[in-house]
Image: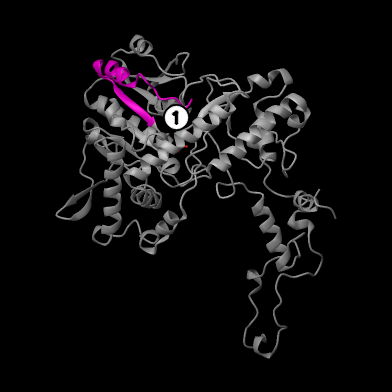
Amino acid sequence: MNANSRQVLWKKEPYIFEQGSSGREGISLPEEDEDFSTQNNPPLPSHLLREPINDFPEVSEVEVVRHFTRLSQWNYGVDTGLYPLGSCTMKYNPKLNEEVAKLSGFSFAHPHQPEPLSQGALHLIYELESFLSEITGMDRVTLQPAAGAHGEFAGMLMIKAYFADKKDARIKVLIPDTAHGTNPASVSMCGFKAVPVKSNKDGIVDKDTVASLMDEDVAAIMLTNPNTLGIFELNITDIADIVHKKGGFVYCDGANLNALMGIVKLGDLGIDIAHINLHKTFSTPHGGGGPGSGPVAIKNILSDYLPVPIIEKREKRYFFNYDQPKSIGKVKSFYGNFLVCVKAYAYILTMGNSGLREASKTAVINANYIRTKLKNYYHIPHDVICMHEYVFTDKNQHEYNVNTLDIAKRLIDYGFHPPTIYFPLVVKQALMVEPTETESKETLDNFINAMICIADEAKNNPDLLKNAPLNAKITRVDEVTAARNPILKWKRD
Ligand SMILES: *Cc1c(COP(=O)(O)O)cnc(C)c1O
């Protein structure tokens, strides 16, 4: 044994199938006696009896508990440390909001419960829609879509329905080259043609570029703001004017609202329709396979096309209104992911207006703090004041033959989840850091120090980075094979 033995044990955790020994059992029950005799309790019918399982682990209870506890500790989450995954807003979400969503009145509410017995839930949905309308500066909100990409799809369907209604056969949607991949995907799923818009050297969209592409075949421009480089689209109001003059809509991908809450209202920027991600900004974590919620906020011009049912209030009673002849229909069963909405509602009420503004300000300050502390070590392609996240590259490390993946992998050894890498696609070898507002200055400083150490190691010991991570059970995986041909079952060789 030495000081490293814990780590060694941790790395050598055997499979459960390799543990225990023949005859060992997880529980001890009394030997069969009179009371348990087959006389009073006839034996189970043979067709219900399990066949013996080959190689079934024979382990004690404590072996099982320790094994799975150790496995659980290999996991990395926001509850264990900084998770600076750009474009994902992996912030800490107060446990209080989980408790609220767990209240039985919410969690056991049956979606078929009649309206008179669902007044509390309907009230919550109705109010959350109005809170989100206020925060985004828009007129109406639907909470039905289950994710950001789903919100984009629903939003684009509304735009499509509008033009179909007006007998205007527009086919194109302008999308900047900085956009999230879901944008062109949603647009083409709705039958539109995505037209790329080149961003300028400052990483934002020029109004002249938009003017040169804008014609009466264009249904909408889809702008992300702040964009995926973490930069505010400064020309957005001029761009909105250009698009509106030709009868198009301005769609905002507002997934990154964490930089704007209580500071900028999308509606004031000339935006007609936007989706936001409750599972980034509003107390549900992004990632992990859901559930999520991607509400769509609209100006009144699109209200006829909202998905049904719409929740309305008459004489203090809430009810579902399905009578919307121009609606795009339903995009999700029942009324979206209700418990995600409950958490967002609790979050907004506990934060209040000033709390939300403070959260966004802190998110922006934290990102800029890291950016300025690291700019002498890592190349920043667009070195301007950023919003909630920023993008740097491995360019300064090229001469040592160290790349983005090596830097990201080495961060694991320092106890941090790596940032988003190789995205956005417009930046070669990108690393995208989003620290969020819930991290303390001490945590940010630890991250900065780790990054500086890694820059130093790149220079003096590049092989170390090539082999990183050294302190993880699984180090480098063949990601293509893992995605295309996953092996998820243990087999004895
Ligand atoms: C996260 C994100 C999306 C997609 O949201 P999902 O809920 O993962 O579908 C779209 N656009 C941007 C800018 C995002 O950051």
Q: Quadrant of ligand 1?
A: top left
Amino acid beneath label 1: Met
Q: Locate residue 488, reporting x and y percent.
A: 67, 46
Q: Locate residue 469, reporting x and y percent.
A: 72, 37
Q: Locate residue 440, reporting x and y percent.
A: 53, 43
Report whether residue 12 is seen: yes
Q: Quadrant of residue 70?
A: bottom right
Q: Is 217 situated above or below 21?
A: above
Q: Is 161 situated above or below 317?
A: above
Residue at image coords 69%, 43% = 487
Q: Is 493 situated above or below 243?
A: below
Residue at mark 1? 387
What range is drawn magenta here? Answer: 229-253
Asked whether 411 falls inside the magenta stretch, the response is no
In the image shown, does 331 or 402 lie closer to the viewer?
402
Report whether residue 52 is seen: no
**Numbered disc total:** 1
Q: Give the color scheme: rainbow, by chain, secondary structure or one colour.
A: one colour
The residue sitting at the right extreme is 1
In the image shown, does 382 or 208 lie closer to the viewer?
382
Q: Is residue 197 left or right of residue 162?
A: right
Q: Is residue 378 left or right of residue 353?
A: right
Q: Locate residue 371, reporting x and y percent.
A: 54, 28
Q: Secondary structure at mark 1?
A: loop
Residue at image coords 25%, 20% = 168
The residue sitting at the left extreme is 315
Quadrant of image for the N terminus = bottom right
The residue sitting at the bottom extreme is 34
Q: Is residue 176 left or right of residue 143?
A: right
In the image shown, does 124 or 335 lie closer to the viewer?
124
In the image shown, does 459 or 100 lie closer to the viewer?
459
